Amino acid sequence: MDKNFREVSVDPTKIKSRALALMNEVGLTKVANEVKREKGLLLQAFFSVKTHKQNYPFRTIVSERRSWLNVISGYLQTNLAQLKLEDPFEVASSNCVVQVLQNNNPGGCFGFSIDIEDLYYSLPHVQLLKFVQQTIEGQMNELGFVESCKIPVASFLELLEFYLKSTIVQWQGRTVIQRAGVCIGSCVAPVLSSIF
């Protein structure tokens, strides 16, 4: 936990209030009302074992369930999902990999593993926000995105940045925040890593 998170002294009620103010300022009153109804102020952490690693280390995963951040990440995810990401290296199905191994495997390889160490933890916010903006601008005109998400691109990016900086976790009586990147367990983590 200490590798990727640091202890903070913050008032989660004030952070939620700032989120509400930001959403009302940009005209997301419906989302703001949903946030207001959510009682959970902090994310919860749980762990899974990395069985493929030596000494079986734990991976920290956060749960946004029953928290106001879940409402915001749902809004962000819905709008980021409309972006059509074309990644020439994306594997749509493991069957594609199996087929390549069966047809083009002169060395008799039976399997392999690819691991990007701490993928979500290593996504730098500044560059990530820049890439999100470039992806939006490259795929659709700003008016199309604004029509869909109901706020200007700059406001959407501001809300995304606020969300990334507000993923505060309660763990063993401590209040911690991730040192960098996007929390594993955040519903926007997969699409943000694909954009990056």
Image (cartoon, helix red, strand yellow):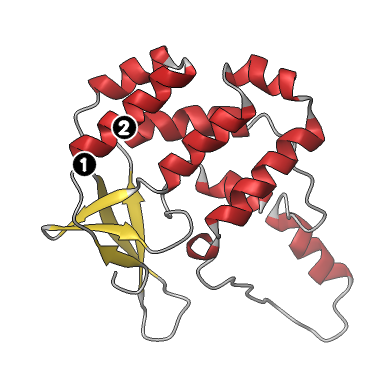
Q: Residue furthest left?
A: 173
From the image, which quarter does the C terminus lie in? bottom right
Neighbour class for label 2 at 10 Å: few (<14), some, many (≥20)? few
Question: What numbered label is drawn on residue 58?
Answer: none
Residue pointed to by mark 1: 12
Between 108 and 62, the one lying in front of the other is: 62
The answer to whether residue 53 is above or below residue 87 is: below
Q: Residue placed at 88% from the left, 69% from the top?
A: 103
Q: Is 74 left or right of 169, judged from the image as shown?
A: right
Would you name the residue on which mark 2 appears? Answer: 18
In the figure, 24 relative to 15: above or below? Answer: above
Percent x, y for residue 137?
76, 34
Element marked by disc 1: helix
Instruction: Report the residue at 59% width, 47% height from top.
Output: 192
Q: What distance separates the C-alpha of mark 2 from that of mark 1?
A: 10 Å
Q: Would residue 99 be found to the left or right of residue 79 on screen?
A: right
